[in-house]
Amino acid sequence: DAGVTQSPTHLIKTRGQHVTLRCSPISGHKSVSWYQQVLGQGPQFIFQYYEKEERGRGNFPDRFSARQFPNYSSELNVNALLLGDSALYLCASSGGFTYNEQFFGPGTRLTVL
Amino acid sequence: AQSVTQLGSHVSVSEGALVLLRCNYSSSVPPYLFWYVQYPNQGLQLLLKYTTGATLVKGINGFEAEFKKSETSFHLTKPSAHMSDAAEYFCAVSDLETSGSRLTFGEGTQLTVNP
């Protein structure tokens, strides 16, 4: 079975632009979480979605938004990009809201110039 | 609120030597604890996890960790380091009952293995 997939692998944007990152969870998994990992730091929680509803949000500005589709895939959107948004964005899937294991995708490397 | 502290952002060992990576946590509820490994330009791979039960947890690649409630610690060990163990290691905590499976990570420890 395929693991968690993310697209694109890399992208470069300029300040003020908008970006959409995509994630497909492991087949049968209903929960998707998003994390931001700035170079040299641990991942920071952004969102968790379960059954297409937002179930948790980290300490990120409203420029960050996400949604989950009926097939449980997910999009992370970031508006008005800042230089500080440059990071590796990780998607993780799990079987349910309180399942105790998350499986991570390879990430999307976003560079904001 | 939960937090994780990893002591030592960089650890260097010789091949065949003991690996010890330190992790301390704070949590207002019984924690679920995890160690993840990240190789360059890759996502995170779960090494091991503690949920309930036995406090000594064995994981993949010969790693193990011991949950010590009195010390609020969850240190990661491996008896004999291999060159392939060189990577970044992250300790993480979650409290499923209140926050679902969201993880709070430490800052990471970069492990270097010298020949």
Image (tube, coloured by chain):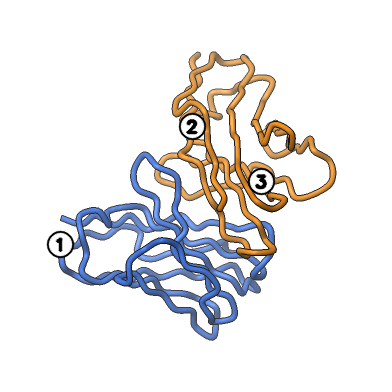
Chain colours: A blue, B orange
**Image check: A9 left or right of B39?**
left
Pointer 2 or 3: first along the chain? 3
- Label pair 2/3, CB-CB below 8 angstroms: no
Is A94 on the left or on the right of B115, as rendered?
A: right
Residue drawn at point x = 69 percent, y = 63 percent: B97
Residue at 47% x, 58% y: name it.
Answer: A45
The subunit letter for the residue under badge 3 reads B
In the image, B91 versus B24, the foreground residue is: B24
> Which residue is tagged 3?
B33
Q: Nearer the viewer, mark 2 or mark 3?
A: 3
Instruction: Specify whether B42 is left or right of B64.
Output: left
Q: Badge 3 local density, few (<14 within 10 Å), some, or many (20+)?
A: many
Element under disc 2: strand
In the rendered image, the quadrant that contains the N terminus of chain A is bottom right
Q: Are marks 1 and 2 on the same chain?
A: no
**Residue B72's x, y, as percent?**
67, 36
Residue at the disc numbered 1: A14
Residue visible at 36% across and 53% down in the picture: A88
Chain letter of mark 1 equals A
- Per the rendering, the mark at residue B109 is 2
SS category of the residue bearing label 3: strand
Callout 3, which amino acid?
Answer: Leu
Work out how far the residue at label 2 is from the one at label 3, CA to CA, in angstroms: 16 Å
